[in-house]
Amino acid sequence: MQAVSVETNDDGDIVVSQKIDDPNYPDPIIVLSPDQVPLVVSWIYEARESSAPDEDHEDQSIPVNFYARGPEAEAENLSVFNNSRGMIVLKIDDETFIEISPAMAKRLREQLSSTIRSALTDMLGPDA
């Protein structure tokens, strides 16, 4: 495995390079705009997870911190955002929210996607 370096250039782009020291080929260099970085990072995480198929996260529980007023709370609208600590916050109202790590939010997203696909399949499927 060859070492990979990550730097920024004068334009503010991210430059990923790998020194392979092959006289027949230039060292590979990838230039990413700051807008492309989250997408590329998600691809890297997905590739890493697909390379380890023995780990099935679908049935694992998702640890969250849940803060609530109690059962007398009225229905509210859900909003989602990042807080200053880098956690994903699912806000129900000013006093009720769920705080979850980005890695666990991704696991939640995968479980939600699977559940949504299942629900759509059931809904659009023929009647018994």
Image (spheres, rainbow, N blue to C red):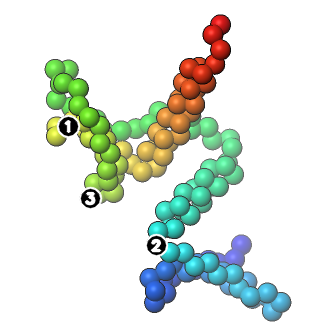
Regarding residue 6, the answer to whether it shows in the image is no
Q: Tag 2: residue type?
A: Pro
- State which tag comes first along the sequence, 2 or 1: 2
Q: Which-is-in-front pick, marks 3 and 1?
A: 1
Q: Which residue is mark 2?
A: 34
**The residue positioned farthest toward the top in the image shown:** 128
Q: Which residue is mark 3?
A: 84
Instruction: Look at 65% across and 55% down and name the residue there.
Output: 47
How far across and how far down the image is residue 94, in percent? Answer: 16, 40
- State which tag comes first along the sequence, 3 or 1: 3
How would you rate the neighbour count of disc 1 (Cα within 10 Å): few for under 14, some for 14-19, many for 20 or more? some
Task: State if disc 3 and disc 2 touch (CB < 8 Å).
Answer: no
Along the line of sight, the residue nearer the viewer: 50 or 81: 81
Please tell me in which quadrant of the rendered image residue 6 appears.
Answer: bottom right
Regarding residue 101, the answer to whether it shows in the image is yes
Residue 11 vertical placement versus 108 (above, below): below
How would you rate the neighbour count of disc 3 (Cα within 10 Å): few for under 14, some for 14-19, many for 20 or more? few
Q: Disc 2 to disc 3, how far (Cα)?
A: 20 Å
Q: Secondary structure at mark 2?
A: loop
Relative placement, left or right, of 52 versus 41 is right
